[in-house]
Image: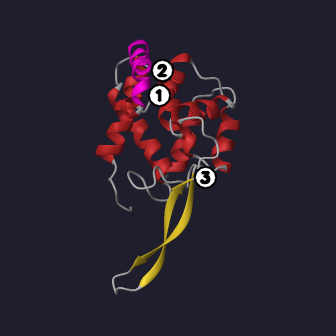
Amino acid sequence: METKEKILELLRSTNRAGIEDLIQYLENSDFFMAPASTRFHGNYEGGLAEHSLNVYTALKELTQNKGFNEDSLIICALLHDICKTYFYTVEMRNKKNDRGEWVKEPFYTVKDEMPLGHGEKSCFIISEYIKLTKEELYAIRWHMGGFENKDQYNYLSGAFEKYPLAVYVHMADLLSTYITEAKGGEK
């Protein structure tokens, strides 16, 4: 099954009120075409959707038999980086080709028109369509873990202690980024 269809099937399986509106947002945005980053993991067309599905797979494995709600796993994993919709643009730069000739090459840059912060923005966008549980809210907000600014570490620690799902989402994100997905190269 193709990445997009699998993501949509999983989201629909939650039967969460407003999920069809959220799916419509995803389908009308660049979510399924956007990269996951500009230079690192998933820095190619479709990388964001692929990364999101990888996070779900890792999260399922990490939380197996731990009693977490399946809907929460789906929502947190697939939507943790929804903040990256409408976030990247393509620009052109000069680069020498194999023959030593200068050619124009496309590359991704960030154009953040909604500067709310990474996890915060994801929570904001999702909450416009569906109601998040407290556990989901914290897991998505703090999924960046140690990549947060150091002045946020006390809050991060408190969230991790209170909501173990936040720890698992962060771990699944790390596993997907640094183990499952290739770093620094084109697909």
Residue 69's disc is 2
Alpha carbons under labels 2 and 1: distance apart: 7 Å
Residue 85 image point, x, y percent: 59, 47
> Can residue 99 be seen from the camera position used here?
yes
Viewer-side label of 2, 3: 3
Residue type at mark 3: give it: Asp
Residue 43 image point, x, y percent: 43, 56
The answer to whether the residue labelled 2 contacts the one labelled 1, judged by CB atoms less than 8 Å apart, is yes
Q: Secondary structure at mark 3?
A: loop
Q: Is residue 154 above or below residue 184?
A: above
Residue 70 image point, x, y percent: 48, 25
Q: Nearer the viewer, residue 6 or 105?
A: 105
Identify the residue at horizontal 45%, vertical 59% (top origin): 44
* Residue picked out by circle 3: 30
Q: Is residue 32 left or right of residue 158?
A: right
* Span highlighted in magenta in the image: 149-163
152 falls in the magenta region: yes
Residue type at mark 1: give it: Leu
